[in-house]
Amino acid sequence: MSAKPLFKRVLLKASGEALMGSQGFGIDVAVADRIAGDIAEARRIGVEVGVVVGGGNIFRGVAVASKGGDRVTGDHMGMLATVINALALATSLRKLDIDTVVLSAIAMPEICESFSQRAALHHLAQGRVVIFAGGTGNPFFTTDSAAALRAAEIGAQAIFKGTQVDGIYSADPKKDPAATRFDSLTHDEVLQKGLAVMDVAAVALARENHIPIIVFSIHEKGGFGEILSGAGRMTIVTDN
Ligand code: UDP
């Protein structure tokens, strides 16, 4: 690995599905520990890391809405699910002696600190991993949008979107053997081609703030650190 990482500060988006591992539901602690190990490696090479965690392994608001329930309440439940995941990932990081703080978009002071940009910048400057819980704090959004929003707020130089595969493909590579991986794309191309990598609001926000999105496999041990060091397989989305 090269001595100097490509970025000083990044935002990692880990979905709930990633934390679930091969289980059908909930958190696979071994997977959370491995992702924590990858974040620890990024810290070791001097990269400041913010993390947005999803909640889809536990709850998604649309599940309530599709059964005739209230979408807003469902989304509140989904946002609470992200807090559970954030606490799990923080636990895995602390086991590795990585100084970590959870900042929630929804105030729950007995459990974790509340999000503010000032608090986030302070903790990052102190070398802490900052886990952003509770999504944006608003219904009808996703944690992808939260990732783009927090990345802009903390001045992240890139959003690392961890997915099941090692980049953006022309079609789902798990279903279509002819699918090819893009090395690079622009934000506009992702939106125009309707590539399902992050939701439209997230890509648009990243584009507006000129933040590259790096799509990589979160399942590959060491993959995060490798890309930070200038190697590894990924697709990079930039505005030019
Ligand atoms: N959610 C929300 N507002 C946000 C972020 C998340 O209402 O800003 C809710 C929404 O119901 C969503 C759920 O939390 O389905 C879990 O987030 P997401 O689906 O983004 O998780 P992931 O797919 O990354 O696991």
Image: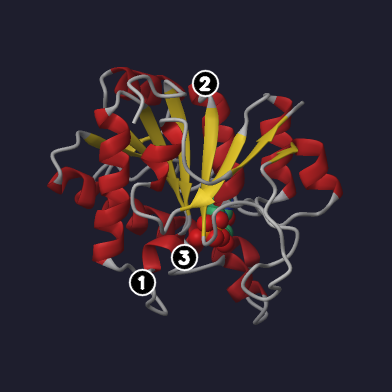
Q: Earlier in the sequence, mark 2 or mark 3?
A: 3
Alpha carbon of mark 2 to alpha carbon of mark 3: how far?
26 Å
Q: Residue under label 1, please give it.
A: 26
Q: CA distance from mark 2 to mark 1?
A: 31 Å
Type of the residue with mark 1: Gly
Residue identifier under label 3: 17
User: Dividing the image into 4 quarters, which one contains the C terminus?
Assistant: top right
Q: Is mark 3 within 8 Å of ligand 1?
A: yes
Q: Residue at x 64, y 82 (%)?
A: 67
Which amino acid lies under the numbered mark 2 shown in the image of this protein? Gly
Instruction: Identify the image quadrant of the N terminus.
Output: top left
**Residue 233: numbered disc:** none
- Could you tell me how many numbered marks the image carries? 3
Q: Amino acid at mark 3?
A: Glu
Q: Position of residue 111 (x, y in %)?
A: 25, 47
Residue 174 visible in the current orientation: yes
The residue tagged 2 is 155
Which residue: 72% across, 31% down?
207
Ligand 1 visible in quadrant: bottom right
